[in-house]
Amino acid sequence: MWGPEPVRLCTVDGLFLAAAYYASVTDGPCYLLGHGFTGSYQTPGFRAVAEHLHGLGASVLAVSFRGHGQSEGRSTVGVDEVRDLAAGLTWLAERRPGAPVITMGFSMGASVVVRHAGLVSGIGTAAVSADGCRPAAVVAISGPGRWYERGTTPMRRVNLGLETVLGRQVLRWAFRTRIGRGWDLLPAAPVEVAPAITVPALIVHGSDDPYFGLAHPRMLASAIPGAELWIEPGMGHAENATGTELLDRIDGWARRALTASGTMGR
C-alpha cells in the first residue's frame, strides 16, 4: 500500500477538482469520500479517515468538492456536488476497473452521496453518472434529510454565512470556501430521492450531533429500502467525530454488504 497520489478530476460541467488517491495492492473495495462543508481532502479529520480506511486494505479517493480548497468553481452546498461524486466514480472505474466502490460522505458530503445514489438509480442522467459508474454501497454520516435546518445554533450560523455578504467573505478567506448563488428552484432534498436507492445503505449519526438532530437520520433510514441505521452514543458531528473504532465497524459492514450483494470479488 502507498499514497497519497495527487489527482485532478474533471466534472461533466467542466470543473477541475483536487483529490488524493490512496492506492492499495489488495483486491479490497474502493472508498470514494466526500467531506463536510468548508472541508477538503487536506483537512486533518478527513485525511485521517482516508488514511485509516487505506490502512484497512482499501483504495481510497478523497475529493475536494467544488468551491472548496484547491478545487475550481463555487459550492452549491450539496446540489451540483453530485457531479463531483460522479467524476470520482468515473476516475475509479478507469483506475480500478471492476472494483466495487463505496461512496461515503460526511455532513454535506452525506447529502451528496444520498442524492447521487437516489438520482442515478431513479433517473440515471448524464449529470450525475457515466455508464456503469454507480456506487456498490452508500454510507452517509452526520447528514441532513431535508434542507434549511435552522433548529440548532450551529446550523443558524452556517445559514448566516451562506446568506449574507459578510458571511460569504468570511467563508472565502477563513475557510477557503467559495459559495455560488442561491438555488433558483428548490432541489430535491436527500429524503425525497432516497427511496430510489437500490444498493446497500448505512446511515450513521451521533446522539450528540450539534448540527442535525436525530429526526434527520431516522427519516433517511425510513426512506431508503433496507437501509441500516446506527445511532452512535456520545458521537458529535461528521469526520472530526468519526473515530477509528467506528471506521473499523463501517468497513466491516461494507465488506459484508458487498459480499451479500455479490459485488465483492468481481
Image: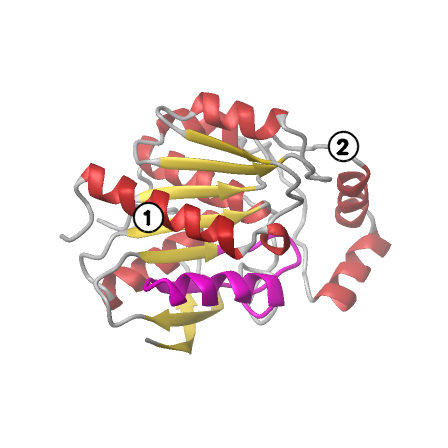
Residue 264 higher or lower than 188, as above or below = below
Residue 39 higher or lower than 213, as above or below = below
Task: Please indicate whether residue 177 sits to the left or right of residue 152 in the image.
Answer: left
Specify the segment rendered in magenta: 34-63
User: Does the image show residue 219?
Assistant: yes
Task: Please indicate whether residue 262 sits to the left or right of residue 109 in the image.
Answer: left
Give coordinates of residue 255: x percent, y percent. Answer: 29, 47
Residue 253 higher or lower than 118, as above or below = below
**Amino acid marked by disc 2:** Arg
Give coordinates of residue 143: x percent, y percent. Answer: 57, 39
Q: Nearer the viewer, residue 11 or 58?
A: 58
Task: Please indicate whether residue 16 sits to the left or right of residue 147 in the image.
Answer: left
Q: Give the crowd class for mark 2: few <14, some 14-19, many >=20 residues within 10 Å.
A: some
Of the numbered discs in the image, which one, if any, rests on residue 150? 2
Q: How many marks?
A: 2
| 252 inside magenta stretch | no
Q: Nearer the viewer, residue 26 or 78?
A: 26
Residue at image x 42%, y 46%? 250
Q: Secondary structure at mark 2?
A: loop
Q: Secondary structure at mark 1?
A: loop
Distance of label 2 from label 1 (alpha carbons): 32 Å
- What residue would you read off at disc 1? 129
